Image (spheres, grey):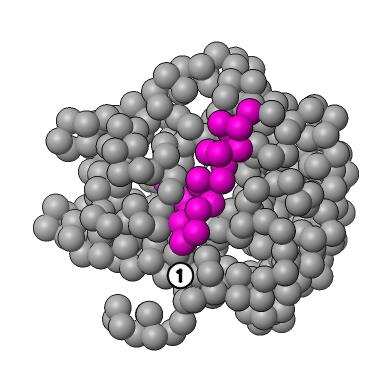
Amino acid sequence: MSHRLHDIARYIVSPQKGILAADESSPTIKKRFDAIDVESTEDNRRAYRDMLFTTPGVEAFVSGVILFDETIRQKALDGTPFPALLAAKGILPGIKVDAGAKDLAGAPGEKVTEGLDGLRERLVEYRGLGAKFAKWRAVIDIDTAKGIPSDYCLEVNAAALARYAALCVEQEIVPIVEPEVLMDGAHDIDTCDAVTERGLRMLFSALATQRVPLEQILLKPNMVISGKKSPTQASVSEVAAKTIACFKRVVPAAVPGIVYLSGGQTEEVATAHLNEMNRSGGFPWEMSFSYGRALQAAALSAWRGKAENVAAGQAAFLHRARCNGAARSGAYNDAMEKQAA
Ligand code: 5MM
């Protein structure tokens, strides 16, 4: 077993720390910038990421950042390549290596993530650029009326995630394995629970078939949560209890850490859920965060593309990172939000 990969995975889930997912692809970052009326130019994208990555003190709560292909090649405003700037702060650079979710043939309404062709060669290049870990995201929708997700969709996505993970391990890069069950629908929390369990069973079976050492990966799942349009919204304690119970049924204890995605939860709710899980305890993995929107939303609106707002954007980002750092040990509370306000 590569102790190096296990050590990197363990480092990423160090106490108080988690991951900033800043790997928005070009269409996604455009959507985020449109919302604050900022044009999505290469320079603006660089300035935004520069603001996040140079936030003083954020390294106390962020152990890794997932970058997009463009960003891993960019330099900070002071000329330092972003991976080197992050590494100097003790933050590991990571890279999104999937090519996005595309329509799945023969399965209307379902997706499969592409990007396996040439992946070995791309991993070699990314390792040379400083990447210590990678990320691949499968997107699973729920539409019970249409029988979605099908076993077919879950199986092909699990197989692709496992092939990606095996290649990462071969190339000495920690794979973050992200099977995301979307929270967009009107389904209740028990439906999310059942789909998440079904998907994870297939995923861990595929990982075993493809000889992926579980000690060397991190799992980045959705929480077990009510669909956004569901009339019944589960409480924080129900989400925490059902998420822990679901993962205990299907995620082997050899996996060093579970780093949740936020998936469209508000910033405070995503923090509260993580906090409640860690407060409850009783599971064998580190439970941490790999949030995109739930770490960036306030920072984006404070920044609005203006250099004079950089300090405000950084303060907003540091605040969210600190709250999630506290949630790693169940120490987050309302007072932290009130103090910052
Ligand atoms: C930051 O968003 C990531 C990239 O999304 P696209 O490939 O669609 O541009 C995304 O994969 C992200 O890493 C995860 O979904 C977690 O982000 P959220 O916002 O759900 O915490």
Q: Residue furthest left?
A: 308
Residue 131 rendering spot, x and y as whole percentages: 45, 30
68 to 37, vertically: above or below: above
Q: Residue at x 56, y 31 (%)?
A: 4
Residue 152 rendering spot, x and y as whole percentages: 86, 39
Q: Residue at x 32, y 40 (%)?
A: 86
Magenta span covers which residues? 2-24
Mark 1 residue crowding within 10 angstroms, few (<14) / some (14–19) / many (20+): many
Mark 1 residue type: Ala
**Res 247 visible:** yes
Q: Residue at x 42, y 19 (%)?
A: 128
- The quarter of the image holding the C terminus is bottom left
Q: Is residue 195 magenta?
A: no
- Asked if the residue at label 1 sits under 8 Å from ligand 1, the reply is no
312 to 134, vertically: above or below: below
Q: Secondary structure at mark 1?
A: helix
Relative placement, left or right, of 248 versus 17 is right
Relative placement, left or right, of 19 versus 113 is left
Question: Which residue is more in the foreground, 6 or 313?
Answer: 6
Residue linked to disc 1:
326
64 to 173, vertically: above or below: below
Q: Quadrant of residue 170?
A: top right
- The quarter of the image holding the N terminus is top right
Q: Residue at x 67, y 80 (%)?
A: 237
Residue 136 rendering spot, x and y as whole percentages: 60, 37
Residue 98 rendering spot, x and y as whole percentages: 58, 32
Relative placement, left or right, of 243 versus 289 is right
**Res 276 visible:** no
